[in-house]
Amino acid sequence: MRNNYWIIILTMFTALVLTAMPYPDWVAPWRPAWVVMVVIYWSMALPQRVSIGTAWVMGILLDVLQGSLLGQHAVGLAMVAFVTAKLHLQIRQYPLYQQSVVIGLLVAFYLCNLVWVNGIIGRPPQSWAFLTPVVTSMLLWPWLFVILRDIRRRARVS
């Protein structure tokens, strides 16, 4: 049996690249939570291999990439990975449209955690626009799920 752990690393690196990619000003607020969605997928598909530790490392990389408070994204991603790993059997049974709702809730939980930390350090949000990635993440989830599932099956990631 092949493990192909490098596939997981490659998909997470791709999520980091998509997060760092510049968007036009009018699209930037709608940027999907790529890293969160990829961490959720792998925590749901292989919770014994990708869970809190991997999410923490991805969060630290995201903190460094975005120049935010070190540990801010790491804590949020670790909490999302924990919830996903705990509920992975239930979430996997849902049809994709219901999974999208769960993903939206998890992304909202993650973003609210970021806003909470920013509020503590004196940078509260200017408006509710910080939640716009929830919508795009929910809309993109079915396609991302199908693509990552196909990659996982073809590469026999286990």
Image (cartoon, rainbow, N blue to C red):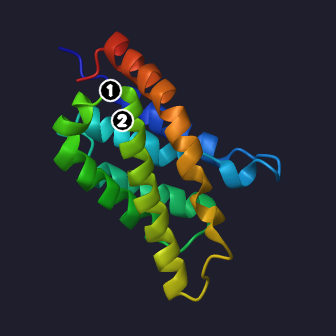
Residue 87 in the image, given as x and y percentages of width and height: 20, 45
Q: Are marks 2 and 1 in contact (CB under 8 Å)?
A: yes
The amino acid type found where label 2 is placed reads: Gln
Q: Is residue 110 visible to us here?
A: yes
Q: Nearer the viewer, residue 92 or 37?
A: 92
Residue 84 in the image, given as x and y percentages of width and height: 27, 47
Residue that sits furthest to the right in the current view: 25
Q: Give the total of numbered labels.
A: 2
Q: Which quadrant of the structure image shows residue 18?
A: top right
Spatial separation of the CA atoms under disc 2 and disc 1 = 5 Å
Name which residue lies at 31% across and 61% down. Answer: 79
**Residue at the disc numbered 2:** 98
Name which residue lies at 32% across and 59% down. Answer: 78
Q: Quadrant of the N terminus?
A: top left
Crowdedness near tag 2: few (<14), some (14–19) or many (≥20) residues, C-alpha within 10 Å: some
**Residue at the disc numbered 1:** 95
Q: Quadrant of the C terminus?
A: top left
Above or below, comparing residue 10 to residue 59 in the picture: above
Q: Is residue 58 visible to us here?
A: no
Q: Nearer the viewer, residue 157 or 29?
A: 29
Above or below, comparing residue 90 to residue 22 in the picture: above
For label 2, the SS is helix
